[in-house]
Amino acid sequence: MSRVIKVGGAQLGPIQRAESKESAVARMVALMEQAHREGCTFVVFPELALTTFFPRYYVEDPTEFAKFYEREMPNPVTRPLFEKSAEYGIGFYLGFAELAEEDGKTRHFNSSVLVDQSGRVVGKYRKVHLPGHGEFDPERSFQHLEKYYFEPGDYGFPVWRSMDGIFGMCLCNDRRWPETYRVMALQGVEFIALGYNTPSVNSQRPEERGDERIFHSDLTVQAGAYQNATFVAAIAKAGNEDGNPLIGGSIIVHPSGRVLARAETEEDELITAVCDLDDTIFYKQTIFDFARHRRPEHYTRIVEQTGVILPD
């Protein structure tokens, strides 16, 4: 049986702070309609796809941004996207800010959902590797307060059997950490959906500009795909959000590490690639046959240690 899917990478241009979620959803529905016309069966949207990238703003009372979080998925605002998914038979991935009431506590996560071709949520992921800082930093040219607005994800890196394949999810900074891909690869992942919002300038190193940041993004995604024998679709929210530029550079990558499709703009743009999930098999059975080649007895430091311990 063929396991070919046509993937649409639905890059979004900027979402300004004043833009409504309804407007953002309408833009995503338009991209899904385009994906349907082009024969896609799975679409990947960016991280925090419903709002501006609000962790760049510091407010003393974080509840000022309560409107940016979602208590459930789907909800009345996002339901049109789920309805189109079911109508067209297109699965999708969507990043959003999550507010959860658990064990009597209000919790906040940078999250994503995996939705199958019937419009049903089959999995949820919470971002593990939160970048940036947890308090206002006057030394930065702009803030990156994910540790202020979110707590680290508590689901790990699960995968799901869906749509004739094994799918995983991660978000933005997760792509820079090789453990992200390897944990999913050890569960047989064949396709990783990854949304991101990455500033075009490093707030602590202003000489690092957009081209270098896109190079770093490509490097991590292509290496993650190749070293773990999986497709990866890394899809951006891009462009100038209220004076704060984000890189584009959305890509879909083959398990060989080869880029199959790349966005050319910083606006709403659909890129597509035909992905045969059976293309992962050769790599999983040869150079990255984990059962034959891995030596985990030598890797214990990776899970036992966080910071660097220098030799004597």
Image: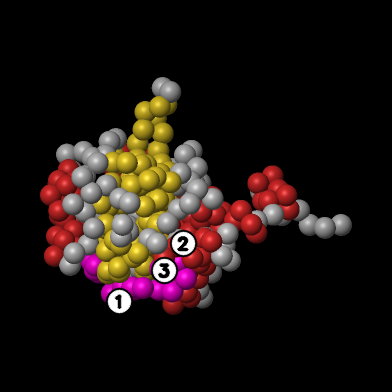
Question: Between disc 1 and disc 3, whose residue precedes?
Answer: 3
Question: Between disc 3 and disc 2, whose residue precedes?
Answer: 3
What is the chief secondary structure element of the magenta stretch?
A: loop
Dot 3 corresponds to which residue?
A: 254
User: What's under tag 3, amino acid-wise?
Assistant: His
Question: Between disc 2 and disc 1, whose residue precedes?
Answer: 1
Q: CA distance from mark 3 to mark 2?
A: 12 Å
Dot 2 corresponds to which residue?
A: 281
Q: Residue furthest top?
A: 104
- Residue 250 vs residue 278, the one in the foreground: 278
Residue 272 in view here: yes
Q: Position of residue 150 (x, y in %)?
A: 44, 43
Residue 216 lies, with reference to residue 29, above or below; the image says below
User: What's under tag 1, amino acid-wise?
Assistant: Glu
Asked whether disc 2 touches disc 1, contact meaning CB atoms under 8 Å apart, the reply is no
Residue 303 lies left or right of residue 172; in this view the side is: right
Question: Closer to the camera: disc 2 or disc 1?
Answer: 2
How has the structure been colored for display? secondary structure
Report the magenta residues as a range: 253-270
Tag 3's secondary structure?
Answer: loop
Q: Position of residue 121 (x, y in %)?
A: 28, 41
Number of residues whose C-alpha sits closer than 10 Å to that of mark 1, classed few (under 14), some (14–19) or many (20 or more): few
Image quadrant in which the N terminus is located:
bottom left
Residue 128 lies, with reference to residue 29, above or below; the image says above
Q: CA distance from mark 1 to mark 3?
A: 19 Å
Residue 148 lies, with reference to residue 138, above or below; the image says above
User: What's under tag 2, amino acid-wise?
Assistant: Ile
Residue at point 87% right, 57% down? Answer: 312
Q: Is residue 118 magenta?
A: no
